[in-house]
Structures are given as C-alpha cells and as structure tokens.
Image (cartoon, rainbow, N blue to C red):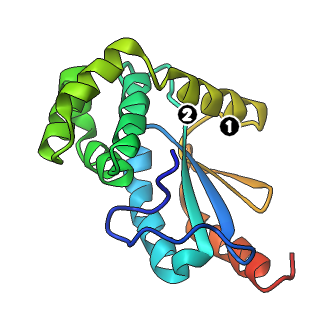
Amino acid sequence: MSDSSPASAPAPAAAGPSAVVLDVWCELQCPDCHRALDDLHALRERYGDRLEVRLRHFPLEKHQHAFAAAQAAEEATEQGKGWAYVEAVLGRVEELTRGGEPFLVEVARELGLDAEEFDTALIDGRHILIVDADQAEGKAIGVTGTPTYVIGGERLDGGKSQEGLRARVEEIADRLLTGQG
C-alpha cells in the first residue's frame, strides 16, 4: 500500500534521506495486527515524517477473507483512504470473519468511498498482483506470521508475541536516524 500513515496522523511528506522506512507485514483478518495499531500510532506520534510506515500485505491461509481484504485495502488506497480503511477493518475483525466481501464493501460505503467500485475491484481482481507481490516478498525474507516488522534490514516477528517490539523498533529507528547504524 502506498498510503503510509495511520488515519489519525497527517500524511507524511515523501520519505527524504533522513526518513527511516518501517515495513509492516500485516493482514486485515488478524487480531494481532489489530493490537499492533496502538504501537503504530505511538511510532507515528514519536517520529512523525522521519518514519515512513508502509503496510505490506501478508494474507494468511487460515483466514478465509484476508486475501480479499488486502485487495480491498488497495482499492481504498487508490480512492485516497487506505489507512482509514485498514484501521476500520482491523477494528472489526470478527465482523470480517462473519461477513466476508459484503462486509468489506460496507466498510467502504461507511467511509464515503465508492462502494460499487470496491465490489467491482473484488470481482475483477485488479489489485491481485500487488497483494501477490507483497506476499511473495514477505515469504522471500522469512515472514511467516503477522504482524512482522522490517526496519533497517532487521526482521522483527510479532506473530507469536508483540512484547517489546515497539521498543526494539524505536531502538533501531533511533540508531538509524542518528547515523549510527
């Protein structure tokens, strides 16, 4: 997803030479990814535009609607509300589990997005290549669960436990931003 800031934070300027990139491998039917939102908000608050948070799709096979949700998130990004959509869906993981694609379209409607275009995008698969590419890249670098963070070339797995991850991300970001890493 190219939309790189949580909905509650202003969109950052393009990452300059002093910005650090944090790739967040996530899937929208994952309760752990929902819990990770608090960490992402705190990181955006602390670093502002010095940290570019990029959502990367990693739909897990165990979650039936995760692949469609990733495609829907791409459509939301195309319509200008990527992170708002991601946060809305993650905030209602159980509803996604029960409602599937109709739920994804309803969330788009609630956010004032073109719900008919969402429905069409889910049918025609226009965003499949983006989701497939993210998932393939994740597998290539050893992502096995979500959320997984990559910052400064280091992979941090939050799929089993998120304890201490935000502190570790901050430690790496601070080192990279001060030129010590």
Point out which mark residue 58 bears.
2
User: Does the CB distance between marks 2 and 1 fall below 8 Å?
Assistant: yes
Identified at 69% across, 74% down, the residue is 173
Identified at 15% across, 46% down, the residue is 112
Q: Quadrant of residue 172?
A: bottom right
Q: Earlier in the sequence, mark 2 or mark 1?
A: 2
Q: Amino acid at mark 1?
A: Val
Q: Quadrant of residue 180?
A: bottom right
Residue 100 seen from this side: no
In the image, residue 11 sits, relative to residue 73, either above or below, namely below
Given residues 55 and 35, the one toward you in this image is 55
Q: Secondary structure at mark 2?
A: loop
Give the number of the mark in front: 2 or 1.
Answer: 2
> Is residue 164 left or right of 78 when viewed as pictured?
right
Residue at far bottom of view: 178
Residue annotated with mark 1: 143
Of the 4 image quadrants, the one containing the C terminus is bottom right
Identified at 34% across, 41% down, the residue is 76
Q: Secondary structure at mark 1?
A: loop
- Where residue 88 appears, as percent x and y from the top left, is 25, 48
Mark 2 vs mark 1, CA separation in Å: 8 Å
Given residues 70 and 35, the one toward you in this image is 70
Identified at 45% across, 62% down, the residue is 5
- Where residue 150 appears, as percent x and y from the top left, is 69, 54
- Where residue 12 appears, as percent x and y from the top left, is 50, 71
In the image, residue 60 sits, relative to residue 174, either above or below, namely above
> Is residue 93 left or right of 64 when viewed as pictured?
left
> Is residue 126 left or right of 106 when viewed as pictured?
right
> Is residue 16 left or right of 163 when viewed as pictured?
right
Point out which mark residue 14 bears.
none
Residue at far right of view: 180
Q: Amino acid at mark 2?
A: Phe
